Image (cartoon, rainbow, N blue to C red):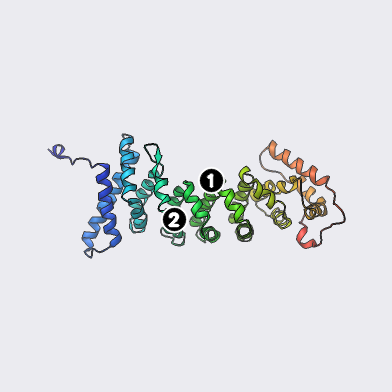
Amino acid sequence: MKGLFKPKPRTPMELVLQTRDLLIFLDQNTETRERKREEKMSELSRQILDMRIVLFGNGQAGPNPDACAHLAREFFKHDTFRLLVVCLPKLDLGARQNATHVLAILQRQRVGGRLIASEYLENNLDLMDVLLPGYEDGDIALTYGAISRECIRHQIVASYVLGSEYMKKFFTYIQIPNFDIASDAQSTFKELLTRHRSTVAEFLSANYDWFFQGYISQLLQSPSYITRRHAVKLLGDMLLDRSNSAVMVRYVSSLENMRILMNLFRDSNKTIQLDTFHLFKLFVANQKKPPEIISVLVTNRSKLLRFLGDFSIDKEDEQFEADKARVIKEIATLEIIGDRSCTDADDCEVES
């Protein structure tokens, strides 16, 4: 007989409105009776799971596109996105994971050909002021980090974060002692600096001095080899992107920047050495090298040629060998212009 009295499935609107009411209850936290509160929390967990099933399917059948679009429309219309983000720290682990999946897929859901999450976030950019400080709270850091990266997929959000003080805070977040949190912050930092190329190019050009000063002193020269490894790789990704050509030319025209890279060749980690080489070759290939850079390359010619001659990687790579040959040839044929010479041997020379 039970089969005759199955509850009628709730519509996406009902799901959203009931979830919203429960989130408001949780946010206000006015219930003093523990049993009543637990009942509400359990009901909220079921609601979030039901939304996930609508969006992802139940394992036997896939999601219904119309239901997904309807749920997304109601979710953003009633500001449930904000409520769920704010209440995430109060959810248990299972509900938090389901909520993270719901928030992620809803940001990619199109309604009538429109990505309505972008429109919503454009009017609610302050949500990033809730999400990004999460890196300072070990309990919620990874959850808020994952949601932040989904938000950054929208160019309007990335532009907001790039123009905020959080860019300076990332230098600290990336070096948090907790490895998982630091790695997550590094992933978000990389997403910010590589996804939206034109926006990133504008940011780097307008903020060149303070950004690269912090990047070099806190990341490239970090005592942590993991931080250095990520920093060298990301720097290469940025400078080798054609959108950042003007920034790259400015960067490789600096003697101090080249000196730091030459010192990174001393790193015992082979991956760091290889990524450093890919950056160093930009300085050597620059057809408008400043005289001081030419002077340092000539001063260190024998050491550089000896190092590069012995430098190899574990697997065969024709492109690497060709690049190395060009760098060796360029350094071998360099001539000092005029009488200019390296005036500070301690800063210019590299060890054999």
Compared to residue 20, the image places residue 116 above or below, namely above
Give the image location of residue 25, x and y in percent. 26, 58
Query: For the point 27% across and 42% down, which residue is it?
Result: 12
Which residue reaches farthest top? Answer: 61
For numbered disc 1, what is the local secondary structure? loop
Q: Nearer the viewer, residue 244 or 342?
A: 244
> Is 320 placed left or right of 109 in the picture?
right
Query: Residue beneath label 2, please?
Result: 128
Pointer 1 with pointer 2, Cβ within 8 A: no
13 displayed left or right of 336: left
Quarter occupied by the N terminus: top left
Q: Earlier in the sequence, mark 1 or mark 2?
A: 2
Q: Badge 1: how crowded within 10 Å, few (<14), some, or many (20+)?
A: some
- Front-most of residues 85 and 173: 85
Outermost residue, left side: 1
Q: Which amino acid does label 1 sit on?
A: His
Disc number for residue 196: 1
Residue type (three-letter) at the residue carrying disc 2: Met
Label 2 sits on a secondary structure element that is helix
Q: In which quarter of the image is the C terminus?
A: bottom right
x, y percent for residue 154 = 46, 46
Q: Write down the quadrant of residue 59 in the picture.
A: top left
Q: How far apart are marks 1 and 2 (CA)?
A: 17 Å
Residue 47, position as x, y percentages in the image? 27, 48
Residue 10 drawn at (x, y percent): 23, 42
Q: For the point 70% across and 36% down, which residue is it?
A: 318
Q: How many marks on residues? A: 2
